[in-house]
Amino acid sequence: MALIALRNLLALMVMIFLIFLLERSVVLRKLPWIKGFWIGGIGFGFGSLLLLVAQAMTDATTAALAAAAMPIFAVGLEVALDGRRLSGRFLVAVALVLFGGALAADVFPGKSSIGTGFAFGLFASGIFAWGSRQTVKSFPSLSPLSRTAITTSGMFGFTAIPCFAAMLFEHSWSTVGSLDISNIGLLFIYACLALGFSQVFWIKAVEDVGIGIASFHLNATPFYVMIIVFILGSEWNWVQALGAAVLTVGTILAQLPEKRFHHQTAQKI
């Protein structure tokens, strides 16, 4: 927990530095920090912690597959809040995504630990989708960098508060671990690049194409994870590979109508 809080703090510092460097007209104290804190704390802080819990209860591949189900929640938000219409093809795609995700995660009766972990991952995906959409919708006049900075403050605060409490009670959550040169370098790379820059790019994508279409592109994650884990020496799991393939088919089917819709809209304009 302490390491996660430190990572979030470093990412926030990078974003604030970039605002000073690239957006000189922005007055930091006038940004809506309080509202951004709550959106980021719930959407990104709570959501990311749930995903870590899911990974601890299962494995990296299963957690990634749960995250890949985010398009279901993302498009669901657009249907409920933005009036998006669903096609028959999309409903078939939802069924394929659910079946493929369950197959890949090995979620069957009698394996409650895996099923519970996968459920936590799905819940985390839904919260992350809400936080991403809310970041864009709540601050339409701000740049992607400023939006990301104020919500990252909430992501940091959500993890920092439990860490301070853990320090008072000498809980293991306050333990940082070994911080040698190598680990510090990896921490800076993760905080600055994998979290800092990528989060700004993600919010920009949500603004440009919507949370539904943006979330479809995250479905490449399970394949990367499975390949990396296999390269590192783990055994290849054909059941998970089949589930990932079925999930991919569902993702493609879900994305095709959306692309066509945006293409027709652009032609009319």
Image (tube, grey):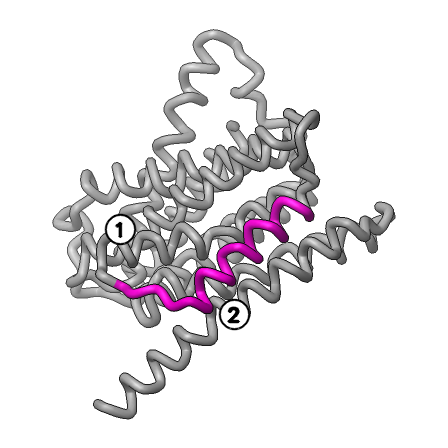
Q: Position of residue 210 (x, y in %)?
A: 33, 65
For the point 44% across and 53% down, which residue is it? 72
Judged from the image, the secondary structure of the residue bearing numbered disc 2 is: helix
| Residue type, numbered disc 1 | Gln
Q: Is residue 56 above or below residue 222?
A: above
Q: Position of residue 8 (x, y in %)?
A: 44, 41
Which is more toward the observer, 176 or 155? 155
Tell me the quarter of the picture where residue 148 sits: bottom left
Q: Amino acid at mark 2?
A: Leu
| Res. 225 visible in picture | yes
Mark 1 / mark 2, whichever is N-terminal: 1
Q: Which residue is mark 2?
A: 253
Instruction: Using the image, determine if residue 172 lies above or below residue 150.
Output: above
Taking depth in this image into account, of 119 and 226 the one nearest to the observer is: 119
Query: Residue at left 22%, top 60%?
Result: 82
Instruction: Kindly give the residue lying farthest to the top in the view shown.
Output: 169
Q: Which mark is residue 134?
A: 1
For the residues carrying marks 1 and 2, which lies nearer the camera in this image? 2
Dot 1 surroundings within 10 Å: few (below 14), some, or many (20 or more)?
A: some
Helix, strand or loop at mark 1: helix
How dense is the environment of label 2, judged by Cα within 10 Å: few (below 14), some, or many (20 and up)? some
Look at the image and give the residue range highlighted in magenta: 84-103
Q: In which quadrant of the rendered image does the C terminus lie?
A: bottom left
Q: Height in image: 76 above or below 5?
A: below
Residue 98 appears left or right of 19? right
